[in-house]
Amino acid sequence: MAENNNQNKEQVQDINQLLKVRREKLAALQEAGKDPFVITKYDQTHHTDEAKKLYEDLEAELLKGKDELEYDDKRAIMDESPIEVSIAGRLMSKRVMGKASFGNVQDKNGNIQIYVSRDSLGEEPYADFKKMDMGDIVGIKGNVFRTKMGEISIHASSVILLSKSLQILPEKYHGLTNTDLRYRQRYTDLIMNTDVKETFIKRSKIISTIRRFLDEQGFMEVETPMLVANPGGAAARPFETHFNALDEDLKLRISLELYLKRLIVGGLERVYEIGRVFRNEGLDTRHNPEFTLMELYQAYTDYYGMMDLTENMFRHIALTVNGSAVVKYGDLEIDFGKPFERMTMIECVKKYSGVDFDEIPDLEAARAIAKEKHVEFEERHKKGDILNLFFEEFCEEHLLQPTFIMDHPIEISPLTKKKPDKEGYVERFELFINGWEMCNAYSELNDPIDQRARFAAQEEAFAAGDDEAEHTDEDFLNALEIGMAPTGGIGYGIDRLVMIMTNSPAIRDVLLFPTMKSLDK
């Protein structure tokens, strides 16, 4: 133990010394009139991948049919048509070898080797380059060439220090592996781990793909309030805050639903929003207290129309973002190309638990079978609640391929239209993939009298101890009384979708800045 403590102290001392040296280098530059922080712009003509592509295209043209030539002869031909570029990025490595040095510069699109020589730069600029550190931001101007080892590189004619790095990046070959540190210092994570950067590039592409898909379907993107007096649309505990100007307590929204439905009432017919929502709940691999939700509402359709739209949308996202309808997640291959399976919740519970809730006559019978099957329930739970508990206990883990679970009990669906041919159930579905709930959708309840009764039942549930129950929203009821067309709606979390599409094991891996406990706690 003592030996480890001594090693740690020595490491801290070494790091502090390195940090001190970097600040001394900056001070020396500033004293010499070369302060990098006074530079306001740099003429960046290309990114690293573009420079490589330019050279490859010219090489293919000029050296076509000349494979037998020696390297020097090929180089001479290429030098007759020089490709001059000006790139900018972070210096990730440097090997000084007397009068010439190699380095590697990384930008947003990739990286490229640089060759820096005293003869090309001059005595003083070359000396300045040798003093640069890993992590410095540099501007490189020069000609693109291919080394004898076959690597496309830039022969630098100019090297400019654009920003001095005063911290130390993780060692190249070990990278940044501490998970907690990666989440807290995402900026360092993005620098050191290429796959992390690719995940967030893909996340951005997923969101833009959703927008284009819905725009082409005639949907209009809108924005609704984040600060609300009465958060509704989901079973969740809200975060609370205080608005000083009005001296009112407000809450952060937990859903987008009730305001989007108000817009359907207003005649917009097809609306959607992609935005942050906030739920005061725990942290785990699939939950973060703030996350990105997509909700859409379409007038004159029902939950069957929403099923078709959801299936087409998810398939389109997979094809556009991953280039294939088959997406690999861990050891599972998820096939978005096949028609999604459709089962009612009762059918699914019967399949995986052997219990047919159509044959259970009342609440007492439901409680009895729950006790027999060791499914825990609360006194306030009704028959529909117990059916849902059976579904969670016996079914979810089996729903690996995209599966629509339809026709939920009314007790857990306070905003959904009743099934006209099955008392006690509603026109609702959830999409499950990899055993996860991925999407929730309804034939929306547009009967204001029924909606008021549902809110009253939610108020009773809240009084009985359900702190995630919804509360009566009088303005929303007023909107329904004005009249809302028959409407279908969908909501799904973007983050879980990104997890699936990027093969990411935890939600924090797809959030640039996930919620973290303060280090001083």
Image (cartoon, rainbow, N blue to C red):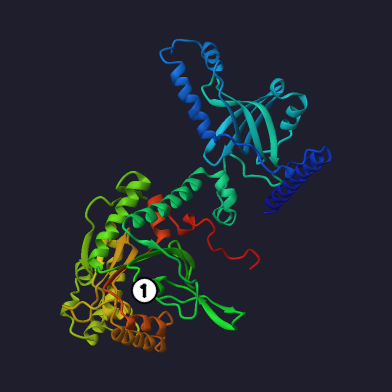
The amino acid sitting under disc 1 is Gly
Q: Which residue lies furthest to the front in this view?
A: 267
Tell me the quarter of the picture where residue 36 sits: top right
Q: Which of 278 and 300 is in front in this view?
A: 300
Q: Which residue is depicted at the point 41% across and 89% down? A: 463
Above or below, comparing residue 260 to residue 63 in the picture: below
Task: List x then y, in percent, for residue 452.
Answer: 33, 86
Q: Which residue is depicted at the point 30% across and 75% down? A: 389
Q: Which residue is depicted at the point 29% across and 78% down? A: 446
Task: List x then y, in percent, for residue 115.
Answer: 63, 26
Task: List x then y, in percent, for residue 368.
Answer: 24, 83
Q: Nearer the viewer, residue 451 or 433?
A: 451
On-image quarter of the C terminus: bottom right
On-image quarter of the N terminus: bottom right
Q: Mark 1 points at which residue?
A: 266
Q: Residue furthest right?
A: 31
**Circle 1 sits in a helix, a strand or a loop, which is it?**
loop
Q: Which residue is depicted at the point 79% across and 39% down? A: 29
